[in-house]
Image (cartoon, grey):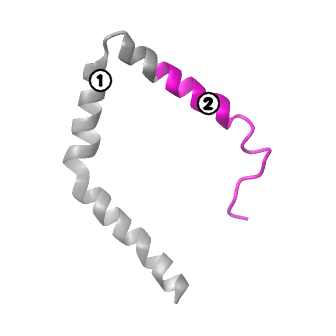
Amino acid sequence: TMFSSKKDLEGTLGFVVLLISIFGALYLLGFSNLFIFLKNNLIDNHTSFYQNFAYFLAVPVICEVQ
């Protein structure tokens, strides 16, 4: 199947809490420049890439519906 089982998802909540805690601690410790760097390099400069990626992902979905 394409969906994860309950056994596969057991550690997901702990992992998400850990990631949020790490990023929150980095932000509170004054590493906000890291987040500005990530925003500028991962989001702002690559918007056209993400738009094209979304279009290419939409093609199989549209073909499957018809």
Vertical relation: 39 (above or below) 45: above
Mark 1 or mark 2: name the one nearer the start of the chain: 2
Few, some or many residues within 10 Å of mark 2 (<14, 14–19, 20+): few
Compared with residue 33, is residue 12 higher up or lower down, i.e. above or below?
below
Q: What residue is rendered at 52% in x and 27% in y?
A: 19
As drawn, 37 above or below 56: above
| Magenta span contains residue 19 | yes
2 drawn magenta: yes
Q: Quadrant of the N terminus?
A: bottom right
Q: Which quadrant of the view contains residue 59?
A: bottom left
Residue 13 vs residue 46: left or right? right
Task: Estimate the x, y position of residue 24 in percent, counting from the top left.
Answer: 44, 20
| Residue at the disc numbered 1 | 34
Residue 17 pos. (x, y %): 59, 27
Q: Give the residue type at disc 2.
A: Phe
Residue 23: give x, y in percent of width and height. Answer: 44, 23
Spot the residue most to the top: 29
Classify mark 1: residues with Cα within 10 Å, few (<14), some (14-19) or many (20+).
few
| Inter-mark Cα distance, 1 to 2 | 21 Å
The residue lying at 21 percent from left, 37 percent from top is 40
Residues shaded magenta? 1-22
Please indicate whether residue 18 sits to the left or right of residue 45 in the image: right
- Find numbered disc 2 in the image and state the secondary structure of the residue it sits on: helix
* Image point (21%, 45%), residue name: 44
| Disc 1 element | helix
Q: Disc number at residue 15?
A: 2
Amino acid tagged 1:
Leu
